[in-house]
Image (cartoon, helix red, strand yellow):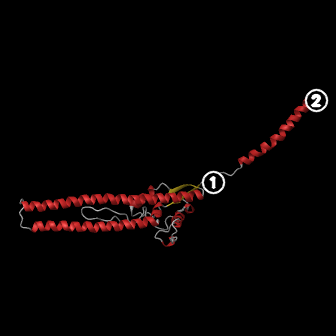
Amino acid sequence: MKKNHWITLIGIALVLGVYAVPATAQQPAQQQAAPAQYIVAIVDVAQLIKMHPEFTAKQEALKAEVQRAEDAFNARKEEIGKKQKNLEASTYKPGTQEHQRLLDDITTDMAKFEADAKSLQRQFALKNSQIMFDTYQDIKKTIGAYAMANNIMQVTDYREFTPDPADPQSVAEDMDQRLVWFNDRLNITKHIIYQIYASRNLPQPNLSQTQNAIGNPPGTASAARTATAPTGAAPTSGGIPMQR
């Protein structure tokens, strides 16, 4: 009975051993699985805004609208100035009914001028804000699509420009950037620009001829910290200056 008992135990051990071997062999295979690759990338958002075809077109249209408003307000300003000069050159004495009527007329014109200027200022500010919003949303959407297609998990904004020791502001802006250094291979700015143009069936821009060599290592080309495309300004009582 004891002999049979040991034979049975040995048989069970062999059976368990047969099934245990494959399970043991599978564990190293699971541990050796390649880890997921998480890629990061860099873009210069200022360059993307500057090169965006719709941003440029909309800003030019807004600039033309501001110029027309400026011309109209300048004409109104000149008209008010003429009324003021005519009143000063008139024979009407201050305090007379006719003098007061003309003075009230000028005061009303100036008040209307100021109100219209402030109203138009708000309109232009909102239009410019909408242009910036739409452009940035489109840029983020394009970056997201490109990142998902290329297994990129994070994209950081880095403004490429050359700080000048003689210009403290540029030095401060350079030091203010949170990203200190990156390998230029991570810069996908030009690829995003190509994607933006391709999605609109537009000819690809020749980036090698742009003022700022997009994709070159930092220090090889000067770039503005913010987009330099013209933005619409608003009229003021002294005229309608354009923000450059």
From the top left corner, tell me how far across and down residue 60 is, in percent: 39, 68
Residue 88 horizontal/vertical position (percent): 10, 66
Q: Secondary structure at mark 1?
A: loop
Q: Give the farthest residue toward the top.
A: 1
Neighbour tally class for label 1: few under 14, some 14-19, many 20 plus, Cα within 10 Å: few
Question: In the figure, 32 relative to 226: above or below?
Answer: above
Give the image quarter of residue 134: bottom left
Identify residue for label 1: 37
Question: To which residue does mark 2 refer?
Answer: 3
Q: Give the secondary structure at mark 2.
A: helix
The x, y position of residue 225, in whole percent, is 43, 61
Name which residue lies at 38% across and 67% down. 61
- Left or right of 114 in this view: 23: right
- Is tag 2's residue or tag 1's residue first in the polypeptide sequence? 2
Q: Quadrant of residue 84?
A: bottom left
| Picture coordinates of residue 195, whole percent (x, y) | 53, 64
Q: CA distance from mark 2 to mark 1?
A: 58 Å
Q: Residue at x 36, y 57 (%)?
A: 126
Q: Amino acid at mark 1?
A: Gln
Q: Amino acid at mark 2?
A: Lys
Side of 7 relative to 173 (left or right): right
Is residue 67 visible in the rendered image? The answer is yes
User: From the image, which quarter does the C terminus lie in?
Assistant: bottom left
The local crowd at label 2, few if under 14, some if 14 to 19, many if 20 or more residues have their Cα within 10 Å, is few
Quadrant of image for the N terminus: top right
Identify the residue at horizontal 15%, vertical 61% (top origin): 105
State left or right for residue 178 relative to residue 40.
left
Query: In terms of depth relative to the viewer, which is nearer, 35 or 241?
Result: 241
